[in-house]
Amino acid sequence: MARDTLTGSRIRERRVAQGIKQAELARRAGISASYLNLIEHNRRRIGGKLLLDIAEVLSVEPALLTEGAGAALIASLREAASDMPQASAELDRVDEFAGRFPGWAELLSTCRQRITALERNVETLTDRMTHDPHLAASLHEMLTTVTAIRSAASILAEPGEIDPDWQARFHRNIYEDSARLAETSRGLVTYLEADDETATETGAPQEEVDAVLEAAGHHVPELERGEPESEALKRLGQSISAPAKELLQNWLSRYARDALALPMSALVPLIAEFGPDPAALSQTTGAGPAQVMRRLAAMPPDVLPDPVGLAICDASGVLSYRKPLPDFPMPRFGAACPLWPLYRALNRPMVILSLPVVQQGRAGDGVWVDALAMPVGGVAVNSDPIFEAHMLVRPMPRDIDAITQPDEVGVSCRVCAKPNCIGRREPSILAPIG
Amino acid sequence: MAGHVLVIEDEPNIIEAIKFILSREGWNVATHSNGEDAVDVVRAKSPDVLILDVMLPGRSGYDILRELRGDAATENLPVLMLTARGQSKDREMAERAGASRFMTKPFSNAEVLEAVRALAPV
């Protein structure tokens, strides 16, 4: 049912809320009660003078009667329904619900958003407790120190004489261990407090780094000028947690190495000549294609007016870097679409997969992606390589001769309605298309 | 009775305390603090009881214990495992690796003494 056909429902809602009888409203609007009844049940369209008259009697703006709920509210309610299918919410009447009870609908939508945010926090905290190496190491250190203190203290507390030398040693041990315990616990509190400040806002260290890089436009002028990484870290890492700072430090180190190998002075003229084509730039400069991709993603808007996006994942598929584009969003939480060439590249290491793709449900011709998986680290005896994949997302090249049908991919399963997808991991919150 | 106890633990002050309480009871105590060559040290010292920490530099206590259990010379060696983690899965891991006893930090001196006494061959 289209939203613009619910004007009658809203009239009825307002009338009942004000305690006006149907016959009374009909009389004051100059129509019969049976005709108003048809209008109120959305069986007759209403507009023009009659709408203005009814709005006047009900003392409301006419627009409040004709305009339905916002698309965002409807979408949020649909998501709430898909989260709890067992509730059997009347999805086909969601527009009517939002139109007739906008306040309740807004409340439901807000509650659902809050639940989602809280679930995310719980997930993050659980993950932190289980997998956070810093937390685990700190707790281990504390327990070990407490054990040493307890053992030494109980020896000293026992009745009977103890050799003065041993006594002095245990006193010294307790003193040293208590100082160590104080230091460890202080560090732990600082760590937890720092994380607490950021947990609600960003959740995980990787998300904090993503936010910092996004705000910086993925470009670090200090490193382009060859200044120390510490300067860049000082500026960018001001308000992030300690684990996030460590991730940022690693990223800046890599950025500095890339900028040294491919300085802007050499790269910018080549981009003007070849465009943001990683294979061509790699061939011309001798730098690795993955390094070229990272450099392209770091270029400021005056070098690349049409920006490029970049996703980097490790061998488990977890995104360790994301620079999304408006035409190619990337999921902030959870895993991305398994159909992305980024993941296919892991199946064909050291081959650049270069092809057009379009995200499901998006208008336009799509984008061009170049994906490549390369081994991390050097060759080692009896040690299989671990791969890292890069995927550069760039505007569709203008000089494509043959029109290639772009591959259809998604963002992530939850917000992708692609039917019969072999890569689907979980149901979509959207209705399937086609 | 008393015998030989080998303590493999990387925290020097814990080593010192355990060594003190066991020595006082008449045990001969040897100590070692690295996981990497721990198996060689156990073979060389042939202790009556081994006290083995789980988190050691170089190699985990579980790994060391598994190797000891695979060797006929040490398959029956009584081993008391020490760990800072007391979750049931850690206990299961210790049991699967072949630990005779499992003790979580912070333990008391009396608990260590009682465990060593119980584990020592009669």
Image (tube, coloured by chain):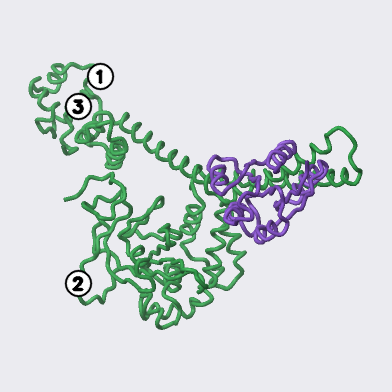
Chain colours: A green, B purple
Q: Nearer the viewer, mark 1 or mark 2?
A: 2
Residue at left 20%, top 23%?
A57
Residue at left 67%, top 43%?
A143
Q: Which residue lies under the disc numbered 1?
A: A18
Is A283 above or below relative to A159? below
- Distance of label 1 from label 2 (alpha carbons): 62 Å
Pick the front one: B99 or B73: B73
Q: Which class describes the residues within 10 Å of circle 3: few (<14), some (14-19), or many (20+)?
A: many
Q: Please say if the residues under marks 1 and 2 sit with CB atoms less than 8 Å apart.
A: no
- Distance of label 3 from label 1 (alpha carbons): 11 Å
Is A375 above or below relative to A112? below
Check the picture and name the quadrant holding the N terminus of chain B: top right
Q: Which class describes the residues within 10 Å of circle 2: few (<14), some (14-19), or many (20+)?
A: few
Amino acid type at image mark 1: Gln
Pick the front one: A190 or B1: B1
The image quadrant that residue A350 belongs to is bottom left
Q: Which residue lies under the disc numbered 2?
A: A403
In the image: residue B74, left or right of residue A329: right
**Is tag 3's residue or tag 1's residue first in the polypeptide sequence?**
3
Q: Which residue lies under the disc numbered 3?
A: A11
Look at the image and tell me whether residue A307 can be seen. Answer: no
Q: Nearer the viewer, mark 3 or mark 2?
A: 2
